[in-house]
Amino acid sequence: EGQISSVKPKTKRSKRFLESRAPKLIEDVKTAMIMKGGNTSQTVTQALKDIVSSNITRPFEDSTSLEFFSKKTDSSLFLFGSHNKKRDHMPNDVCVTVSFVLFAGRLFDFHVLDMIELGIEKYVSLSDVKASKCPEGTKPMLVFAGEAFDTDNEHKRLKSLLLDFFRGPTVSAVRLAGLEHVLHFTALDGKIYMRSYRSLLKKSGCRTPRIELEEIGPSCDLVLRRTHLASDDLYKLAHRQPKALKAKKKKNISHDAFGTKFGRVHMQKQDLSKLRTRKMKGLRKRKGNVVAEEQDGQAPKVAKEAEHTE
Amino acid sequence: MAACSVEALLAKAEQEEAEKLKSISVQKELDLEFDIGNLLACDKNRIDLREFREQKKEDFLRSLARDNTQLLINEIWKQPTERVQEAIVVKLPDPATPLPREKPPPKAKPPTKWEQFAKLKGIQKKKKTNLVWDETRVAKNEYNRLKNIARAQKGKVPVMGLATSTQQSKEELSLAVSVAKTSTASAGRFQDRLPKEKAPKNMGKKRKFEPLIGDFSNERHKQLELLKLMDGKKPKLDITKAVNKQMREEDREEAAAKYKKRAGKKGRKGGNMSGKGKGKGGKGGKGKGGKAGGGGGGGGGKRRGKPGKH
């Protein structure tokens, strides 16, 4: 709320800047902030950069207020990585376990909406996988597999968050040859496997091509840990769309189950006494001829035939 | 016999079709859910843990991903396609999955004072196009363009021969110097002269007017001279001079018209020439500045030699 009243633009440029940050009817693609925790190493930073390669703003050195940075960079998605070294004092040995932790989340109106902690069990970086990569900016195809994404609440929210992160800008059309990147998430055995492939379109004998996949990386095995999800009310509020965007329904047009389009025509009140139900051509007054009024159906037919022969 | 062969043919055709589709068909218990606008596919089928553990993990995941991607591609290929600049592009529907917004939708601002007034009066917003098609301007541009071409081709410049690259005489050089001197913001008034440079002879055609109440004797003398002239038999107008002048002017106009005709055949007729309002000034300038031989310049139009300093 604070943004609108606190700063009054003094120049056209600043005005444009503020307008770009103000709430809009149709929003731009979400950008993500990537932040490092106190102990992050090179690998974690690299991992973060790999995962969200196109929309990152800046990695920050210390974990200051998330919301402050979101305001500064006008980003509504964030990825926060760190690694913790834990020393386990075993009877005979000191064991050090290093765990990489990823916090992924999104904001609504500069307040945290959802935040999910994911443990990275295995990570293979882009550079580790030897394969030609997809060009940056390719809109990826996304696949979520596994029952959990449909049944478990937390998994459902994670799916929505991942969709927000990876889907890229909404486009009205896409080049068929440009459908080359696939991100596949599998929820299985308590873990979530993320794999990234390059899709090759092969000849199949028919119009639709056969797909072959080549792993390009990065890939990671994640474990869902703590979650901080928005309440149902807040979640609903965040989904509220402005009225202007709702598709306008055309009046008097309806469709039935088969897809037939029906229209409705409104007529003015008709004087039923003056309604003509049948054409009685024979009754028309002709020059010099007066035809007696006929009641049965035969008469018009006869008259018609007579017309034809004339 | 015939029936048998027809059946066989049909069966064969079906088999061929099935073969063709084999490469792209995938068997799944439950159909996938698609959101083509987001290039998204959701596979809710149960994944067999045993199979997953038996096989090599990566191979299992890749084959699952391949199948799901194939189904997604099949669905995408059902969409309408069109050709856009050498690439085939598939039109995507609107995204179907609801995702939370970044910021709340903008609040409707109360109409401004002007907007209220406009609504009251029924004033509609009219969009002004910046550029308006202007015939006269187009004609003038065309004429100037042709003049430039002519200048480039002939090697002669219609104005004072200043731009000639051939050896110039002393007079031409001195003329060029004087023109350059006067082409400053203050019309050469504050330009310093070179040490051996002589002051220019014809210092312009500034008319000098006597003060209203000054030299009475001079004024009286002038008035008497005028009366004498008016009384005298000798005509003020020197007929031969006048006739010669008129003839010269006519010749010049003829030549200009001929040139214009030739130029006009290619583009437009320089219709603007007579339009420009400097008729009087132009004529005056021409009369005075004999050297202002505007090659293409007929009547008014832009006079290079200002009737000022020459």
Image (spheres, grey):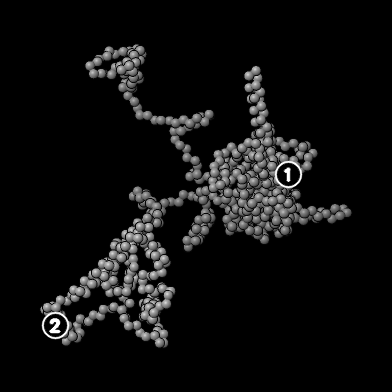
Image spot of residue A7 (x, y percent): 51, 60
Residue position for label 2: B224
Q: Quadrant of the N terminus of chain B?
A: top right
Give the answer, above or below, for where B254 lies relative to B11. below
Horizontally, residue A282 falls left or right of residue A201, namely left
Residue position for label 1: A191
Please name the residue shown 36% across and 52% down the image: B117
Give the answer, above or below, for where A211 lies relative to B128. above
Out of A305 and B270, give the one closest to the viewer.
Answer: B270
Q: Quadrant of the C terminus of chain B?
A: bottom left
Please name the residue shown 59% across and 51% down the image: A30
Image spot of residue A85 (x, y percent): 77, 56
Q: Chain of mark 1?
A: A
Are the residues under marks 2 and 1 on the same chain?
no
Please name the residue shown 64% across and 25% down the image: B10
Image spot of residue A236 (x, y percent): 57, 43
